[in-house]
Amino acid sequence: MHIHSFSSFPALKAQGGRSWQRTFWDSILAIAGPLLVTLPLFLLHLYPLIPNISLLYLLVVLGLASTRGRYAAILASLVSTLAFDFFLVPPLYALTMYRPEEWIALFVFLVDAILTGQLAVLLRQRAEAARRQERETRILYELVRLISISDHLGQQLQAIAESIITVFSSWGIRGCALFLPDPTGKLINRAAAPQTDLSRPLSSDEQAVALQVLREGRSLGFHEMALVRHTAMGAVSRVVIHGSSFQQAMRLRFIPLKWGTRVVGVLLLRIEGGPLSYAEEAHLTEEQERTHPRTTFFWTFLDQAVAVVELARLRDEALDMEILRRTDELRAALLSSVSHDLRTPLASIKAAASSLLQEDVDWDEEERKNFALAIEREADRLNRLVGNLLDMSRIEGGALKPEKDWYALPDLIEDVLQRMQPLLKDRPIQVDLPPDLPLASFDYVQMDQVLTNLVENAARYTPARSPIDIDVQHQKDVLLLHVADRGPGIPEADLERVFDKFYRVQQKKQGSPSPLGTGLGLAVCKGLVEANGGRIWAQAREGGGVVFTVELPLSLQEGSSFPPVTQAP
């Protein structure tokens, strides 16, 4: 997923000192407005025919105050007063008045014009502040919405970098890059906007500035510091940039990304100078910038980037802690299960071998055979345990590569049951195989292990002499292999968890077999079946017990050497 929608971001308007162009046009309008009002009054001799005609000047002052600001309103008030006296109040064409009431009226008009203009300016400023706060709130909302689309830190930082140059373009910010330290302390460029601009690696001088910002936690530009360099002998020298490098340095500013007192990264800004650019505030400290009316929102915006970095760090730490916790749980479960399963067959083997080695006992041939069979049985048990552990490690390591070919499931079932005959000799085994079953594509050795684990699982966790049923069904493009027993069954809540590593069902019924083994057999089955493109699941069986179902595809798969054909009757 790539975050790339910035059309909803409104750009902030530049704030700050007045430019000479704005002052020039404010002056023109403040002078021309009152003169245009005076012209018809003078030509038509409307004063003193209409005594309150001077109120028209207040409209000009109000209009300029609400659109151009305080300077234009005050200048228009003064020009209106002078124009009214010079062109309309006798004696004309002179700034003299003979009656005190005329002076009072003119003074009251001037005060009214200035106060009216000031009120209009205050209303305009409050309206602009409300609109600015609305824009800032919308910008922060859009930023949070964008970075919440993805959990990938790189994409979130890229969204922040691109939004910075979009939102603050009127401030002279034309490029930015976000650098985070790697475990060795080297700063890595994690995001840049435009991506073709500051995505390059830092030069040695820039790296020195950035590292100092990371170390000291204060904003720097090239022109504000003496760069630290190491000589061949290990000494430290300080080199001050000047000349052409100084001109370039004026356009770059490094800002620390802080979380509390800890610096988590560095922001590099490329700023174009100008009367309204962010570079104007480069002389302020971070504390002053955070409270300065022009830059406080920039730092609020930047805090979102810091929060994203810190959240990613906390997420990684939580993930590491969870991995460690699960590793400890698996280690404890493995030690508990394996130690039990290793001790039991080893103890049996040792007991049988020790009995055979007793010189004071004369064992007959039948007893010696029983001891040998016990040793063989427990050795096979150890072999299956080690095999499951190795299979599980190969599955998790991605080293399990099935060698598929087309095989008949009845042949597989026959081989497994024949090999497991000593374990199943006291159990009725019911096998139901429909005629004309098609061949299935799978790795024979791996599916042999799956069926062996399922049958052994049914034998170990069900009462003695209880039946085990095996059948195969052909449905569309799959074959369904069922292994069912009449044991105590599996609780509904555990039907999916039985395929987790080291998970063993705790039986609550008296007389039910206690949970033995490592809890790896079914986990290995799941991994092997999925490696062969199939599925496996467990279901409760009507009348008691559980049914394990293995679904194998019939479609041609990688590794198959010929298309499926039907079995000969």
Image: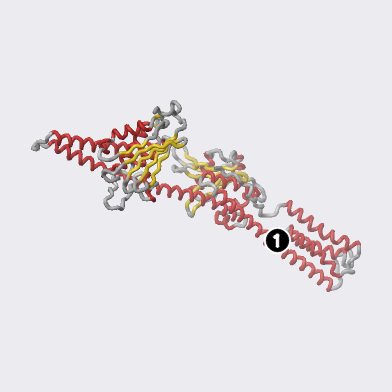
- Residue shown at the point (66%, 58%) measured from the top left: 131
- Residue shown at the point (74%, 60%) measured from the top left: 66
- Residue shown at the point (59%, 45%) measured from the top left: 162
Q: Residue 32, located in which quarter of the rendered image?
A: bottom right
- Whole-percent x and y of residue 311? 48, 50
Seen from the viewer's position, the closer of residues 3 and 400 is: 400
Which residue position holds label 1? 124
- Whole-percent x and y of residue 424? 27, 38
- Residue shown at the point (34%, 34%) measured from the top left: 413
* Drawn side of residue 328 relative to residue 293, left or right: left
Seen from the viewer's position, the closer of residues 405 and 400 is: 405
Q: Looking at the image, how many numbered discs can be counted on the residues?
A: 1
Seen from the viewer's position, the closer of residues 193 and 20 is: 193
- Image quarter where the N terminus lies is top right
| Figure colour scheme | secondary structure
Given the image, on which type of amino acid does mark 1 rest? Arg
- Whole-percent x and y of residue 57? 81, 64
Q: Residue 252, located in which quarter of the rendered image?
A: top right
* Drawn side of residue 333 relative to residue 127, left or right: left
